[in-house]
């Protein structure tokens, strides 16, 4: 089965915050978890793809770059996006199709925006998705804590389906690259 690790908006300013934005919830743990899953992907020869948001740091500078403590594999690809949806106008979906990808593992920021959108978009485009339960984060909103937002999305997106393909939520300690989707399809 062709698989891929997709890390969305794990950028310096989004994780650490800046003068305009709060840091994400449990930022140090998020970076550790991303690195753990990158290691698992690399050990299994699974490609790693990053997506960066061009709105961060106006698309330039240190704040726009992938977080300095994330171990970016040399052969990973980076797509830049101008929309909430990582697949919109980026060439990401074409890349996945060229690899005949069937399953993607998703991590990154921000839970209720780019992560939610990527999970839902992937399932309607013929991909099974594993969302890493402890591998996405966000800052607090005006009405909900970041912890509540993350928990809500983990519950909502676990089992989210679009007939043939769906998402499941698994912890980073699990064998994320042995998809368990077929047991849910039976």
Image: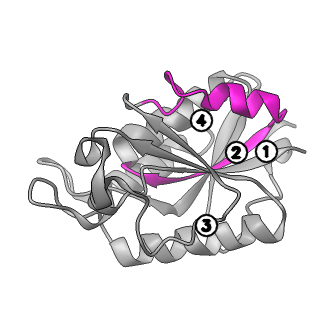
Mark 4 Cα shell of 10 Å, populated few (<14), some (14-19), many (≥20): some
Q: What residue is shown at x 79% (from left), y 57% (from top)?
A: 46
Q: Nearer the viewer, mark 4 or mark 2?
A: 2
Give the vertical position of 33 relative to 91 (above or below). Answer: below
Q: Secondary structure at mark 1?
A: helix
Mark 4 vs 2, N-terminal side: 2
Q: For mark 3, what is the residue?
A: 171
Q: For mark 1, what is the residue?
A: 181
Q: Is residue 184 magenta?
A: no
Give the vertical position of 113 relative to 111 (above or below). Answer: above
Q: What residue is shown at x 40% (from left), y 56% (from top)?
A: 151
The answer to which of 162 and 121 lies nearer the viewer is 121
Q: Which mark is residue 104?
A: 2
What distance separates the C-alpha of mark 1 from that of mark 4? 11 Å
Span highlighted in magenta in the image:
85-110
Q: Secondary structure at mark 4?
A: loop
Q: What residue is shown at x 65% (from left), y 67% (from top)?
A: 38
Mark 1 vs 3, N-terminal side: 3
Mark 3 vs 4, N-terminal side: 4
Q: Quadrant of the N terminus?
A: top right
Mark 1 Cα shell of 10 Å, populated few (<14), some (14-19), many (≥20): some
What distance separates the C-alpha of mark 2 from that of mark 1? 12 Å
What distance separates the C-alpha of mark 1 from that of mark 3? 15 Å
């Amino acid at each position: 089965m062709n698989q891929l690790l997709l890390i969305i908006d794990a950028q310096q300013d989004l994780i650490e915050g800046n003068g305009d934005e709060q840091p994400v919830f449990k930022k140090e743990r998020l970076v550790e978890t991303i690195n753990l899953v990158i290691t698992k992907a690399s050990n299994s020869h699974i490609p790693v793809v990053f997506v960066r948001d061009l709105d961060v740091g106006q698309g330039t500078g240190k704040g726009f770059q992938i977080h300095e403590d994330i171990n970016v594999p040399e052969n990973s690809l980076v797509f830049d996006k101008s929309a909430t949806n990582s697949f919109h106008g980026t060439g990401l979906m074409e890349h996945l199709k060229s690899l005949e990808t069937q399953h993607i593992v998703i991590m990154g920021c921000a839970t209720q925006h780019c992560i939610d959108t990527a999970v839902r978009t992937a399932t309607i485009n013929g991909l099974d998705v594993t969302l890493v339960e402890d591998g996405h984060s966000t800052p607090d909103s005006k009405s909900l804590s970041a912890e509540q937002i993350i928990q809500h999305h983990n519950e909502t997106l676990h089992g989210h389906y679009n007939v043939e393909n769906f998402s499941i939520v698994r912890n980073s300690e699990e064998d994320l690259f042995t998809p368990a989707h077929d047991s849910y399809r039976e």
